Amino acid sequence: MEIKITKTTAPKQKPDEHNLPFGTYMTDHMFVMHYDTDQGGWHDPEIKPYGPIELLPACSVFHYAQECFEGMKAYRTDEGKVQLFRPMENVRRMNTSCERLCIPELPEDVMYNAIKTLVTVDEEWVPHLPGTSLYIRPFVFGTENYVGLRIPDHYLCMIICCPVGNYYKEGINPVKIIIEERDVRAVRGGTGYTKAGANYAISMRAENVAERSGYTQVLWLDGVHRKYIEEVGSMNVMFKIAGKVVTPALEGSVLPGITRKSCIEVMKSWGLAVEERHISIDELMECIKNGTLEEAWGTGTAAVVSPIGVLNYEGKEYTVGSGGIGEVTQRLYDELTGIQWGKRPDPFGWTDPVC
Ligand code: COI
């Protein structure tokens, strides 16, 4: 399928790269593709000026939240070139989400081409300053004008982009996390392993309480036993315990993060032991008390690698390790960001040049 391109005649002013908030300034263009069962599926992929879309109030996504998305970034290298990081991982994961939500499978070659073409069209929006990048947000949702519950025959897939700086105001500095005891994010058999927008909607209440109490994010426990650690806010979580790295196994309720997977591969290449397994809150508390919890950090596209300095459990604060940035956390951050921005060799072949 060929992507039709219509360029804007009124390019917007670009924001100051020194003060780039996350997710606020959209670029000049967007990608749109329609799905209609009676037109044979996905059709008419198009890149056009960023702007409003028209939906009727009966549009199915407003009622049943049949939507999923992805998050990825384009990075500017010191040579002025632009590159992506493992883009096909995002394209494939989006289809995993679509399958769970009964959204028709997206043509992977078209999505990959759309991401690259959109970044090329909006190339001037990829910021230059260290630590900045172009965040890319593909998303897809049901657009049937019908208020009953059934699998729609109409969908819209879009990609928008925005230049971004740090996700957390703390940057690479350690964040404070509170262990959530009331709400749960996901259960096995649900949508925890997908990037369904609804997963993020149901996390807002706990995140909001946490933020109002001075914490950056919450640490989610499993939805059945309220015992096993799952993820932290919008990131996967990893712990260094007595020299070994431990991270919750992927068993259906945890997002299979691309940064998570990359960190595991990098750490294994360093010869570090990495265990993907159940880790209970009791085990974690025991490790804090006996001094074997050396480091904790979150991993995600938006936040990259984010050290956890303080954990709050049952109203009590515990310092993780020294409370600063742990050695493995810093090493991982340097290695991943080094590969992403083209400052370090890419022995894994993860970067993908765009323009
Ligand atoms: C990402 O890390 O890309 C995400 O999708 C998380 C989102 C809350 C910004």
Image (cartoon, rainbow, N blue to C red):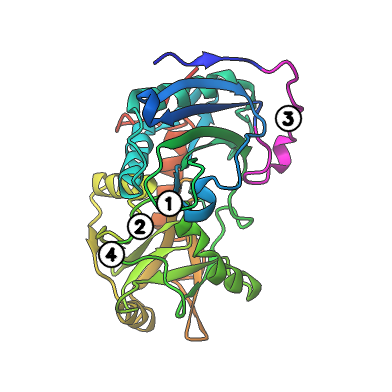
Discs 3/2, front: 2
Q: Helix, strand, or loop for circle 3?
A: loop
Q: Can you identify the residue that label 3 sits on?
A: 14
> Residue 217: x and y, percent?
53, 66
Instruction: Assess whether residue 143 is covered by the magenta stretch.
Output: no
**Quarter location, residue 165:** top right
Query: Magenta region: which residues?
Result: 8-26
Q: Are marks 1 and 2 in contact (CB under 8 Å)?
A: yes
Could you tell me which residue is drawn at 24 percent across and 48 percent down? 268
Q: Which mark is residue 196?
A: 1
Asked if residue 81 can be seen in this view, the reply is: no
Q: Which mark is residue 191?
A: 2
Q: Which mark is residue 339?
A: none
Amino acid under disc 4 = Arg
Q: Dot 4: within a 10 Å radius of its alpha carbon, few (fewer than 14), some, or many (20 or more) residues?
A: some
Amino acid under disc 3 = Lys
Mark toward the start of the polypeptide (1 vs 3): 3
